Each structure stands twice: as C-alpha cells, then as structure tokens.
Image (tube, grey):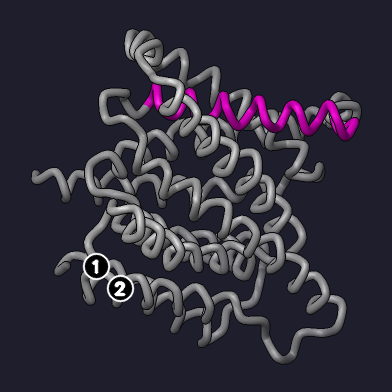
Amino acid sequence: MSEQTLAYVLAGIAALLWGLVVIPIKRARTSGSLGIGIAMATGTIAMFVLSGQDIAKLATLSYGELGLYVVSGALQFALGCGAYYLAIQRGSLSVAVPVTRVKILLVLFLSILLGLEVFRWGLLGAAMLVFLGGLMVGKPASAADGTERDGHWESIAYAVAACIFWAIGETLIGMLPARIGPMASNALLLGSGLIVWSIWAAASGAWRELLAMPGHDIWCFMAHGLISFSAAYALFVWAIQIAGPPRVVIITSTYPLLAALVGWVAYRERFSPRLGLGALLLIGGVVLLQFV
C-alpha cells in the first residue's frame, strides 16, 4: 500500500467515525458549547495515555512550534467544534453538517498560499465538487415553514463560523512538526483547546452550568470525545502528516453522507432529490481525487 493510499484509508475511517458520532451529540440536551469541555477533557486524557513514549518528544518543541499547536488546537476544538456543536443542535443533521464542507475551498486556498500544496486543476475540481455537494445537501427546502427556516439559518450561521475556524486550524495542522507522532500531536492539540475553553468557561461563568449537566449528557459528550476527538482526529492528523491538508479534507468531507443518512433513518428528517444530487457530487469529488 502506498503512503497516499494509506492516507486516504485513514481519512476514510475518520470520516466514518465522524458520521456516526453525530448520534450522541444530537441526543445531548445540553448546549454543545458546554459539552465540548467534557469531550475535549476525555479526548485529551485518552490521547496522552495512548501516546506512550511519544509524549517525551513534546519536550523537543520550540516556542514557535508550541505556539503553532496552541493556535491550531484553539481554532480546531475550542472555537470550531464549539460552533459545530451548536449548529447541529439548532438545526437538522442533514442540513447543518453538510454545510461545513464549504471549508474545503478555504483549506485548499490556504494550503497553496502557505506552500503546503501545489495548485492542480484536478484538485480544484475535486474540491469544487465537494463544495457544491455540501451546498446542495444543505440548501433549505422551499416548503419549510417559518419556524423551521429560522432554525435553519441560525444553524447555518454556526456552521459557517465552524468552517472558518476549522479551515485555518486544519491548514495549520499540516505545518506541525513531523517528528511528533499523531497521538502525541492530537493530545497537545486537544490540551491546548481545553485550556482555551476553560479560560472562556471561567470568565463567562459557564462552568456553573457545566456542574449542573445531567449524567446522560455527560456520557454523550464523553462518547464524542473518545470517538471523534480521540480516534477520528488522531487518524486525521496522521493522514495530514502523509498527504497534506487539502487531499485529506476532501476525503473526510464525505462524512455528511452518513450523517444525513443517520438523520433520515433515526430522526425521520426529510430526504429529497436535492440531497441525493449533493451526495453524488460529494462522491464524485472523492473519485476525482484518485486521479490527481
């Protein structure tokens, strides 16, 4: 198996995990901006434990490299995932989740700008197919009533914010030192995000609400921390170390297909021809990537 194929396989598994993990997030009744603290804490502990001797390599980081981890972790987890949690809790899974795929264009642009990727028309084409697929799946139905539309656009606003934070954070992940293994890297990214989130929670008083969180929700967010923040993100970081941000993000951007299916089957959300067309575009982007 070539390194590029390995990267695509790792990204595909991460996408599968991210598609399934929307279930515990959707079942939680507490705001995701609070639950993200539990998810990050769970993921941080799991990653530090599983990193083993690789943790010692973190002592070799320069101040500049350490700063890169802090900024990446804050954008990826504290800000990006916080906005994402709110997006899927305020709207439909089959709408809020796919819209976040718009970030692929930003990741591609930033990666080329920073010299992490060489411009290729085929790569741009794959990114555009994923981008259009996300828009097709995320467009609101014309028959939606006023209340549903209000919830939809609020959800979209959070999803767009998540796109921006994630695009910058995921591009910066491509600049992290390769000598640090994916689990140790993910542990430091999560720890950095957790610190930033804790400062916000202390300043805003959100920690009081966190203490009152129902046990059911705690388990939901712990599950998300283990599946998404630990397993999926470790695979994601590993894949980026091999193939770079844009190619990996194109693969992981297919997870809305499974998320939409979960919403359709488990939560009886609408399935329309538009969603089917969006799915075909997303898959088309991944197929085109294999020839770039």
Q: Residues within 10 Å of mark 2 (few under 14, many from 20)?
A: many
Residue 53, given in percent of the width and then of the height, sits at 33, 8
At label 2, the amino acid type is Leu
Dot 1 falls on a residue whose secondary structure is: loop
Residue identified by numbered label 2:
124
Residue identified by numbered label 1:
119
Is-magenta flag for residue 93?
no
- Pointer 1 with pointer 2, Cβ within 8 A: yes
Which quadrant holds residue 262? bottom right
Residue 208 located left or right of residue 122: right
Residue 283, given in percent of the width and then of the height, sits at 33, 71
First in residue order: circle 1 vs circle 2: 1
Quarter of the picture containing the C terminus is bottom left
- Give the magenta range: 183-206
Residue 190, given in percent of the width and then of the height, sits at 54, 29
Residue 215 located left or right of residue 190: right
Residue 235, given in percent of the width and then of the height, sits at 35, 38
Residue sitting at 23 percent across and 48 percent down?
A: 243
